[in-house]
Amino acid sequence: MEQDWVFYLQVISTLSVLLPIVLGSVHFKGIDYIFKGFVLFLMAGFVVDMAGGIFALTGFTEGNYVSKYVYNIFEPLFLCWILGKISSNSRLKFLLKIAWIIIIPLWLISVFPNDFFSIYKTTTQIFIAFASSFCILEFVEEDSRITDKLGFWVLIGIFFYNFCTFFFMSFLNSTLGLNLWYLHNVINVVTNLIYFLGFYFYSSSKIKLDRQ
């Protein structure tokens, strides 16, 4: 019975990303190229999750391994790129621009079957959570009507996901981490709801402007 609800939670977690993807696709032409890239990023994550499920069902473990590890280098590099585009702080933009110098070697080490993977994920997620928090502060200081800004919600989602999951990644190889892994799916669902709210408030504000 317990395995059933964990499985359904995982399915909900995977499918929840369709909410921001669908709404983002509806407004794809009207959003900035940065957020067009973000919608495509969400699509890529969905494809990888679906492929992983298919590989698991068919027993193709090599395919699942390769797809996951390719995505694990793509994700932090893309997030560093989008944070660098959103941020107006020159020092932070520089750090995000050169982050690949650290990320790629750490990822190469994590590819080997050892305990370093959790260290790699924890390190990149702490850095991204730190960088996104600075970007959020910039938004708050520059504009009082932040809830209508798509970038604000994207930043909140990025921060929430990376801040919460690095805790679980640090315990990934322990019994506690394995027992609490289902909470990662809950975090994923909440993150996708945050992204969805971003596109929803963006579309609502656009409708109001068109009526004026």
Image (tube, helix red, strand yellow):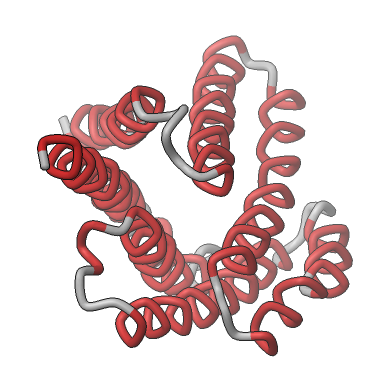
Residue 184 on image: x %, y %: 35, 53
Q: Nearer the viewer, residue 119 or 142?
A: 142
Q: Which residue sits at x=70%, y=65%?
A: 115
Q: Is residue 46 above or below residue 55?
A: below
Residue sitting nearer the eye, 74 or 14: 74
For residue 175, say whether it is visible. no
Residue 202: image x %, image y %? 26, 46
Residue sitting at x 64%, y 84%: 92
> Is residue 103 rendered to the left or right of residue 211?
right
Position of residue 9 relative to residue 117, above or below, is above
Name the residue at the top extreme: 58
Determine the image quadrant of residue 45.
top right
Place residue 187 in its image quadrant: bottom left
Q: Quadrant of the C terminus?
A: top left
Q: Is residue 61 above or below residue 142?
A: above
**Coordinates of residue 188 in the picture (x, y in percent):** 34, 48
179 with respect to 30 (left or right): left
- x 80%, y 60%: residue: 107
User: Which residue is at a point 71% across and 47% down the rendered structure image?
Assistant: 74
The front one of 57 and 187 is 187
- Tag count in the figure? 0
Does the rendering let one see residue 23? Answer: yes
Spot the residue most to the front: 212
Q: Quadrant of the N terminus?
A: top left
Q: Quadrant of residue 10?
A: top left
